[in-house]
Structure formats: structure tokens, C-alpha cells
Image (tube, rainbow, N blue to C red):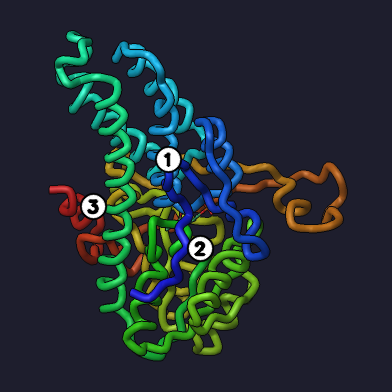
Amino acid sequence: MKVFEIAPVKYIDNKMLVLDQTRLPGEEIYEEMHTKEDVWEAIYKLKVRGAPAIGVAAAYGLYLSVRDFQGTDIDDFALQLKTAKDYLVTARPTAVNLAWALSRMWDKFVSEIHGAGAASDKTAATGFDVKTAKEVLFAEAEQIRKEDEAACFAMGEYGLSLLQPGMGILTHCNAGTIATAKYGTCLAPIYLGQERGYDFKVFADETRPLLQGARLTSWELCKSGIDVTLICDNMASIVMKNGWIDAVVVGCDRMAANGDGANKIGTSGVAILAKEYGIPFYMYVPTSTIDLNTPTGEDIHIELRDGEEIYKMWYEKPMAPEGVKTYNPSFDVTPANNITAVITEKGICRPPYEKSLAALFK
Ligand code: MRU
């Protein structure tokens, strides 16, 4: 699949590098992560963002937290790892990929190292030494990254089967290559379609307040030579009314067991509009983003962010009076009944989602 070669998180030459997405589209700068605090801050400040990319960053970040561990006691190592896991998970609450990736790393450590004998027999002779533990954790982080890349590619194929050449497609926020290991979730079929001559016309909502649509989606699509038109969020209705939109594609940060999906603030409004205009609304959700332990959207923790992001962050001068009251939820929940289909790497789920999502994990 043709997609420009830029990864949000890289681990090369023993360095963890994060593309600072807050500087896009102006500057493409990778920042080296040295400590778990660096990784926490990169996630919190959205230098790395998008649910799957957050998961990948967290996995490498957890490895980083023990990479320079000097001792030989595996229990001390386990304690340092657990402390870092419990810390990193607090960076952002809504995207389940963060907790998912950290738990997966921890479980791997427990099953292959700690629970497998190292806790009771700490000698290097058992093979359960600190060096092996580090290797196992690094390999798992690499595996999480590679699996996400493969999942995105598969979602591209499934997603493309729902689209026709020449379609107008609206997207909200950024669920593209820089929000994942590669290809993106809902932008993957756009890239695949480009390769196969589908000639899509993409409309990107700017996505206030942090402008992921303007700064990131329009940037990555322009860079890939895809026809993209940037609109303000409040223009979604008119482009639908004009007949320019044949499908809406969006990503997801956490999908509950009943199919309610939390995604970037404003997504639920786009879904309501799509329903009104009879336009299919497709949510792209890798299985790493499905949380069967969360029964419904009501149970999803919605991140509230600093109100200054609304009126100060991107402006030279404040765009509202100092001290104005603000409300800045970062996500909203699109109810399952407004989602036409859920595209995963294992196939396309249709309502009733309680059944079709659960079937993915059997
Ligand atoms: O606050 P962000 O930029 O991390 O929000 C990102 C989104 O809402 C994406 O749509 C979602 O994480 C899916 S990314 C494939």
C-alpha cells in the first residue's frame, strides 16, 4: 500500500523516537524519549496520539522504563516495571489501547519470566535473568507495533469493500498513518483505494479544538497526493446536503461491548448528521480498541482537558476573555445505533454489536 513513510514512534539504534505531532504540519521533528516521564508527557501532550499509536508508544515506553535497570534481582526488576506500568496508564484515560498495551507487556513478563520461575529462583542459571526479561519486553513491544501495522492493512481491505470508486468521504480527527503503527485505521482504505485508482474525494473536518483534521489528516493526505478538502467542523452538514459525501469514516478510542464507540469530540454529531442524510457511518476499530469489559458507552471515562486549548493554544492572542468558563471534553460517544458497521482487522461487524463484537474474541 502506498503511504508515505513516516512513523509516529520508532525504536532504532537503541533510541526511542516520537514524532512530535504538536509541531505538525510546520515541522517534522522526532524527539528522543529517555525516561518514562518523557513518554508520559509525550502521550499527555499529544505529541504522540491516536489510540493505536498511544499503545505502541506505551509498550516501548514500558520497555524504556527498565532498559537501564542495573540490578540482578528479578523481583526488584518486576517492581520497577509494575511501578512504570501503573504510572504510564494515567497519561490519558479514554483510549483503551494504552491500558491494553501495558497489560499485554506486563502479562508477557509474568507468563514468560516472573511467573515462570524467576520469582522463586533468581539465579541467572534458570534463564529467567534480567537480561532475558529485557529481551522479552522489547520483543513484545516490537510485536505490538507489527501487529498493529498488519491490523491496519487488513482494515484497509475490509473497508475498501464498502466503498466505490469516485466516492466523496468525510472523516473527523486523524485516524491515519501517524495515529497508528502504519496505514491508519479509517484512512487505510483511502490509501489502498488510491493504489487501485479509486479516486476518492476526501473531506476532512478541521476537528476543534486541537485541529487533528487540519494539522494532521489534511497534511498526511496532501503528502500522499490524495484529493482532500479541509472544512470547518460546522460545515459537515452542508457538504452532506450538497450530495458530496457518500460515506463517513472515523476511528475509535474505545468501543464498549454493546458497540457504543468513543472517538474524538464531535464524532457523535457527525454520526447524527449522517443518519439524517442517509449516509453510511463506518467506525474503524481494531480489536485492541474493543473493550468487552466496558458494557456501554456510559461506562467510558471521557477525558476532560484544559480549557485554554479552546481559545489560546493555537492563537497568537487569546480568542476569549481571560478566565472565561470552559468545558473541553476530548471525546464523545457515538451510540451503536448510529454506526452502520464496525470495521476490524478480523472482519466487518454489523448490528447487533453485542453478538458480532463478542464473536471476534471467541
Ligand atoms: O486526542 P487524539 O488525537 O488522541 O484523538 C484521536 C482520535 O480520536 C482517533 O480518531 C482515534 O484515536 C483513532 S486513531 C486510529
Q: Nearer the viewer, residue 137 or 274?
A: 137
Disc ID at residue 14: 1
Please say if 330 is above or below 337: above
Whether residues under marks 3 and 1 lie with C-beta atoms below 8 angstroms apart, the answer is: no
Specify the label residue 174 is tagged with: 2
Label 2 packing within 10 angstroms: few (<14), some (14-19), many (20+):
many
Circle 3 is placed at which residue position?
354
Residue displayed at 38% across by 39% down: 59
Quick check: marks 2 and 3 in contact, CB under 8 Å?
Answer: no
The quarter of the image holding the N terminus is bottom left
* Image point (32%, 13%), residue name: 72
Q: Earlier in the sequence, mark 2 or mark 3?
A: 2
Real-space Cα separation, disc 3 to disc 1, in angstroms: 43 Å
Query: Which of the two residues, 12 or 86, is positioned nearer the viewer here?
Result: 12
In space, the residues marked 2 and 3 are separated at their CA atoms by 27 Å
Residue 185's x, y, as percent? Answer: 37, 63
Which of pointers 1 and 2 lies earlier in the amino acid sequence?
1
Amino acid at pointer 3: Glu
Mark 2 Cβ inside 8 Å of ligand 1: yes
- Which residue type does callout 2 highlight? Asn
In which image quadrant can residue 319 be found? bottom right
